[in-house]
Amino acid sequence: VIPPFDTSLLTREAPAHAVAALAAVRPGTRIVSICTGAFVLASAGLLDGRRATTHWALAELFRSWYPQVRLDPDVLFVDDGDVLTSAGAASGVDVCLHLVRADHGSEVANRVARLCVVPPWRDGGQAQYIEQPVPAPAANGTAATRDWALRNLHEPLSLASLADHARMSLRTF
Protein backbone atom coordinates (compact mmCIF):
# COMPACT_ATOMS: atom_id res chain seq x y z
CA VAL A 1 0.00 0.00 0.00
CA ILE A 2 1.37 3.38 -1.05
CA PRO A 3 -0.15 5.81 1.46
CA PRO A 4 -1.10 9.42 0.76
CA PHE A 5 1.39 12.14 1.52
CA ASP A 6 1.45 15.92 1.76
CA THR A 7 1.07 17.56 -1.64
CA SER A 8 3.99 19.87 -0.86
CA LEU A 9 6.20 16.78 -1.29
CA LEU A 10 4.98 16.03 -4.82
CA THR A 11 7.69 15.72 -7.43
CA ARG A 12 7.45 14.40 -10.94
CA GLU A 13 10.09 11.78 -10.24
CA ALA A 14 9.57 9.39 -7.34
CA PRO A 15 12.36 9.01 -4.80
CA ALA A 16 14.91 6.39 -5.89
CA HIS A 17 14.19 4.18 -2.89
CA ALA A 18 10.48 4.08 -3.76
CA VAL A 19 11.18 3.16 -7.39
CA ALA A 20 13.65 0.47 -6.27
CA ALA A 21 11.13 -0.98 -3.83
CA LEU A 22 8.41 -1.06 -6.48
CA ALA A 23 10.80 -2.65 -9.01
CA ALA A 24 11.36 -5.48 -6.54
CA VAL A 25 7.66 -6.34 -6.43
CA ARG A 26 6.98 -9.71 -8.03
CA PRO A 27 4.64 -9.75 -11.05
CA GLY A 28 1.05 -10.37 -10.02
CA THR A 29 1.48 -8.85 -6.56
CA ARG A 30 -1.30 -6.42 -5.82
CA ILE A 31 -0.28 -2.82 -5.24
CA VAL A 32 -2.67 -0.22 -3.85
CA SER A 33 -2.17 3.53 -3.83
CA ILE A 34 -4.22 5.95 -1.82
CA CYS A 35 -4.69 9.54 -3.01
CA THR A 36 -1.28 11.07 -3.83
CA GLY A 37 0.29 7.61 -3.72
CA ALA A 38 -0.76 7.28 -7.38
CA PHE A 39 1.97 9.80 -8.23
CA VAL A 40 4.60 7.35 -6.94
CA LEU A 41 3.16 4.48 -8.98
CA ALA A 42 2.95 6.65 -12.10
CA SER A 43 6.50 7.95 -11.76
CA ALA A 44 7.73 4.37 -11.43
CA GLY A 45 5.94 3.50 -14.68
CA LEU A 46 3.52 1.08 -13.02
CA LEU A 47 0.46 2.94 -14.29
CA ASP A 48 1.59 3.31 -17.92
CA GLY A 49 -1.35 2.40 -20.17
CA ARG A 50 -3.52 1.58 -17.17
CA ARG A 51 -6.71 3.15 -15.90
CA ALA A 52 -6.12 4.88 -12.55
CA THR A 53 -7.42 7.63 -10.30
CA THR A 54 -6.12 10.12 -7.77
CA HIS A 55 -7.57 13.02 -5.82
CA TRP A 56 -9.79 15.20 -8.02
CA ALA A 57 -7.94 18.39 -7.02
CA LEU A 58 -4.69 16.93 -8.42
CA ALA A 59 -6.10 15.49 -11.65
CA GLU A 60 -4.87 18.28 -13.92
CA LEU A 61 -1.32 18.10 -12.54
CA PHE A 62 -1.34 14.30 -12.71
CA ARG A 63 -2.47 14.35 -16.36
CA SER A 64 0.21 16.87 -17.31
CA TRP A 65 2.96 14.82 -15.66
CA TYR A 66 1.77 11.34 -16.69
CA PRO A 67 -0.14 11.51 -20.00
CA GLN A 68 0.51 7.79 -20.55
CA VAL A 69 -1.89 6.95 -17.69
CA ARG A 70 -5.62 6.69 -18.44
CA LEU A 71 -6.69 8.90 -15.55
CA ASP A 72 -10.30 8.78 -14.39
CA PRO A 73 -10.70 11.53 -11.77
CA ASP A 74 -14.44 10.96 -11.42
CA VAL A 75 -14.41 7.71 -9.44
CA LEU A 76 -13.60 6.72 -5.85
CA PHE A 77 -11.25 3.91 -6.84
CA VAL A 78 -10.06 1.89 -9.80
CA ASP A 79 -9.37 -1.85 -9.70
CA ASP A 80 -7.10 -2.57 -12.66
CA GLY A 81 -6.25 -6.12 -11.67
CA ASP A 82 -3.01 -6.15 -9.72
CA VAL A 83 -2.85 -2.35 -9.40
CA LEU A 84 -5.56 -0.46 -7.53
CA THR A 85 -5.72 3.30 -7.03
CA SER A 86 -8.03 5.36 -4.86
CA ALA A 87 -9.07 8.98 -5.09
CA GLY A 88 -8.46 10.38 -1.63
CA ALA A 89 -7.73 9.33 1.91
CA ALA A 90 -11.37 8.47 2.65
CA SER A 91 -11.74 6.46 -0.55
CA GLY A 92 -8.67 4.52 0.57
CA VAL A 93 -11.04 2.87 3.04
CA ASP A 94 -13.37 2.03 0.14
CA VAL A 95 -10.65 0.36 -1.92
CA CYS A 96 -9.41 -1.59 1.11
CA LEU A 97 -12.95 -2.82 1.85
CA HIS A 98 -13.19 -3.76 -1.83
CA LEU A 99 -10.09 -5.94 -1.39
CA VAL A 100 -11.43 -7.51 1.82
CA ARG A 101 -14.70 -8.26 0.00
CA ALA A 102 -12.85 -9.78 -2.97
CA ASP A 103 -10.59 -11.95 -0.79
CA HIS A 104 -12.87 -12.85 2.12
CA GLY A 105 -16.45 -12.17 1.04
CA SER A 106 -19.14 -9.64 1.80
CA GLU A 107 -19.86 -10.88 5.31
CA VAL A 108 -16.29 -10.22 6.47
CA ALA A 109 -16.16 -6.87 4.64
CA ASN A 110 -19.42 -5.82 6.30
CA ARG A 111 -18.05 -6.71 9.74
CA VAL A 112 -14.85 -4.75 9.07
CA ALA A 113 -16.87 -1.75 7.88
CA ARG A 114 -19.06 -1.90 10.96
CA LEU A 115 -15.99 -1.98 13.22
CA CYS A 116 -14.54 1.02 11.37
CA VAL A 117 -17.91 2.85 11.48
CA VAL A 118 -17.94 3.41 7.72
CA PRO A 119 -20.43 2.47 5.01
CA PRO A 120 -19.87 -1.14 3.96
CA TRP A 121 -19.97 -0.31 0.26
CA ARG A 122 -19.50 2.78 -1.84
CA ASP A 123 -19.25 1.80 -5.47
CA GLY A 124 -15.87 2.62 -6.96
CA GLY A 125 -17.65 4.32 -9.85
CA GLN A 126 -19.32 6.86 -7.56
CA ALA A 127 -18.30 10.47 -8.22
CA GLN A 128 -15.45 11.73 -6.04
CA TYR A 129 -16.79 15.19 -5.52
CA ILE A 130 -20.39 16.30 -5.54
CA GLU A 131 -21.00 19.98 -4.88
CA GLN A 132 -23.55 19.94 -2.10
CA PRO A 133 -22.91 22.81 0.29
CA VAL A 134 -24.00 22.57 3.88
CA PRO A 135 -27.23 24.52 4.17
CA ALA A 136 -27.18 27.73 6.16
CA PRO A 137 -29.10 27.62 9.43
CA ALA A 138 -32.71 28.70 9.18
CA ALA A 139 -33.30 32.36 9.92
CA ASN A 140 -36.39 31.52 11.93
CA GLY A 141 -37.32 29.02 14.62
CA THR A 142 -34.90 27.82 17.24
CA ALA A 143 -31.68 28.71 15.38
CA ALA A 144 -32.56 32.41 15.40
CA THR A 145 -33.72 32.12 19.00
CA ARG A 146 -30.47 30.48 20.03
CA ASP A 147 -28.51 33.34 18.44
CA TRP A 148 -30.78 35.88 20.13
CA ALA A 149 -30.32 34.15 23.50
CA LEU A 150 -26.53 34.13 23.11
CA ARG A 151 -26.59 37.86 22.42
CA ASN A 152 -28.75 38.46 25.51
CA LEU A 153 -27.07 36.31 28.15
CA HIS A 154 -26.75 39.40 30.33
CA GLU A 155 -30.55 39.36 30.83
CA PRO A 156 -32.73 36.73 32.51
CA LEU A 157 -33.93 34.30 29.87
CA SER A 158 -36.97 32.25 30.77
CA LEU A 159 -38.38 29.35 28.82
CA ALA A 160 -41.43 31.51 28.16
CA SER A 161 -39.34 34.34 26.67
CA LEU A 162 -37.40 31.88 24.49
CA ALA A 163 -40.62 30.25 23.24
CA ASP A 164 -42.12 33.69 22.61
CA HIS A 165 -39.08 34.76 20.59
CA ALA A 166 -39.31 31.57 18.53
CA ARG A 167 -43.04 32.21 18.03
CA MET A 168 -43.83 28.83 19.56
CA SER A 169 -45.92 27.66 22.43
CA LEU A 170 -44.16 26.69 25.64
CA ARG A 171 -45.14 23.08 25.05
CA THR A 172 -43.79 23.03 21.47
CA PHE A 173 -40.60 24.88 22.31
Image (cartoon, rainbow, N blue to C red):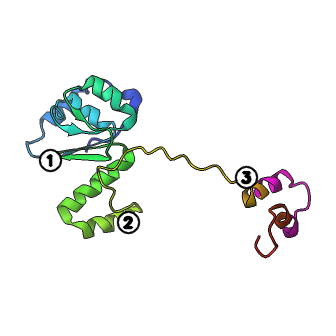
Q: Nearer the viewer, mark 1 or mark 2?
A: 1
Residue 150 badge: none
Write the start and end of the magenta stretch as one range. 146-161
Direction bottom: furthest residue? 171
Query: Considering the numbered disc 2 on the image, is that residue within a helix, a strand or a loop?
Result: helix
The number of discs equals: 3
Which residue lies under the disc numbered 3? Answer: 139
- Quadrant (top left, top right, bottom left, bottom right) of the C terminus: bottom right
Return the x and y of residue 90 as percentages of the image width and height: 39, 49
Kind of residue sitting beneath label 3: Ala
Residue 172 shown in magenta: no
Mark 1: few/some/many CA within 10 Å (<14, 14-19, 20+): few
User: In terms of image quadrants, where is residue 86?
Assistant: top left
Q: What distance separates the C-alpha of mark 3 from that of mark 1?
A: 52 Å
Mark 3: few/some/many CA within 10 Å (<14, 14-19, 20+): few
Q: Which mark is first along the chain, 1 or 3?
A: 1
Which residue lies under the disc numbered 2? Answer: 115
Query: Considering the numbered disc 3 on the image, is that residue within a helix, a strand or a loop?
Result: loop
Return the x and y of residue 23 as percentages of the image width and height: 13, 34
Q: What distance separates the C-alpha of mark 1 from that of mark 2?
A: 27 Å
Residues at marks 3 and 1 touching, judged by CB atoms closer than 8 Å: no
